[in-house]
Every structure is written in C-alpha cells, then in structure tokens.
Image (tube, rainbow, N blue to C red):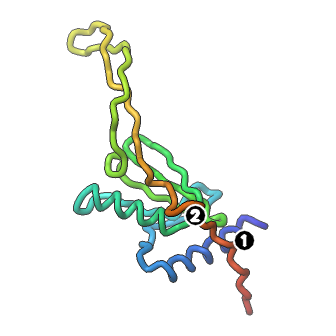
Amino acid sequence: MSARDEYINGLRAFANLLENVPELEIPTHGGQADSGDAIQWLLFGGPGTEEQKTRTASIIRSIPGKWAKRDTGDLFRAHIDLFGLALEIVVSRDAVCERKVVGTRKVIKQIPVKHETVEIEEDVVEWDCGSLLKPIGAGAAELPAPAPLAVTR
C-alpha cells in the first residue's frame, strides 16, 4: 500500500471518528504522517491547566490505539499514527504532568558576577504524566481498517 493510500485510509478512519464521537474536538491543522507534519490539537491558554488536562485526556481516550509521548522542552506531545495519518496533541507540559524532584546532582557552572567556577547542587527531575496515555478499559479496542471508498469519475 502506498503512502497516499495509507493517508486516505487514515482520513476515512478519522472522519468516521469525528462523525461518531461527538465529544472529539476538531483538530487545529494537519499534514501527512511521513512528512513529520501531523494533524494537531494545540491546547494552550484557556481558563486553566485543569481544562487543558481534561481536553488532552478526552482526545486521547476518543482515539483508540497506542499513543506515544515526546518531551520537547516545556511542551508535552502525544502522537499516534492512525492508518498512516499522524495525529498529535501539543500542550504545556506543566498542564498535564506533575514536576517531581527525584534527587540532586552536582554540576560545574560559571557564576557570571564573580567569574569563578563553583560546584552547586541542582534538582534532578522527572515528569510523571500518570495514566494520561492509557486507554480506557482492559485491552482497548483497535480500529479496524476502513473499507476502500468506491470513486466514480
């Protein structure tokens, strides 16, 4: 199957989800999976971080399959390949994850005011995003491949 056919199948599957899952939001913009440009939900701003977390979880739970996460600085990105169609959620990491100090480490830094090198202790952190990417229920269903659409010219 060509990349184009995969993309078309992904669009059909996504259109079916949009039609049948009323709580699934319409994404912000999008592109093709193999180009690295995904259909994205950009969940920034709004009344607060709790709403961003709720919206993120709702989208993830509305689309069955295995979501993966990427940490890119201050952003949390969850992505999934839906039959060749890349879907991605981008949200502030601190809106959906809890910052936890898990230890300290000694690092060498230059202090610009004194212009001397000193050893300081800094936090070693991990971000615990809880069960945000876990599907609802045991053995979440995978989507069946959409049936090819007959095209007449």
Q: Is residue 48 left or right of residue 68?
A: left
Residue 117 figure quarter: top left
Q: Which mark is residue 5?
A: 1
Please state, as top left, top right, bottom left or bottom right, where the N terminus lies in the image.
Answer: bottom right
Q: x and y percent of residue 84 in the render?
A: 66, 64
In this rendering, the answer to whether 101 lies above or below 29 is above
Q: Is residue 25 left or right of residue 32?
A: left
Q: Which mark is residue 140?
A: 2
Element carrying mark 2: loop
Residue at image point 40% right, 42% down: 128
In this rendering, the answer to whether 114 lies above or below 73 is above
Q: x and y percent of residue 78 in the render?
A: 49, 54
- Report the Cα–Cα distance between label 1 and label 2: 26 Å
Q: Which mark is residue 72?
A: none
Which circle's residue, 1 or 2, is located before the other in the chain?
Answer: 1
Q: Is residue 65 left or right of residue 113?
A: right
Q: x and y percent of residue 109 in the render?
A: 34, 15
Residue at image point 44% right, 73% down: 24
Disc 2 residue type?
Ala
Please state, as top left, top right, bottom left or bottom right, where the C terminus lies in the image.
Answer: bottom right
User: Which residue is nearer to you in this view: 131 or 15?
Assistant: 131
Label 1 Cα neighbours within 10 Å, binned few <14 / some 14-19 / many ≥20: few
Number of disc labels: 2
In this rendering, the answer to whether 62 lies above or below 21 is above
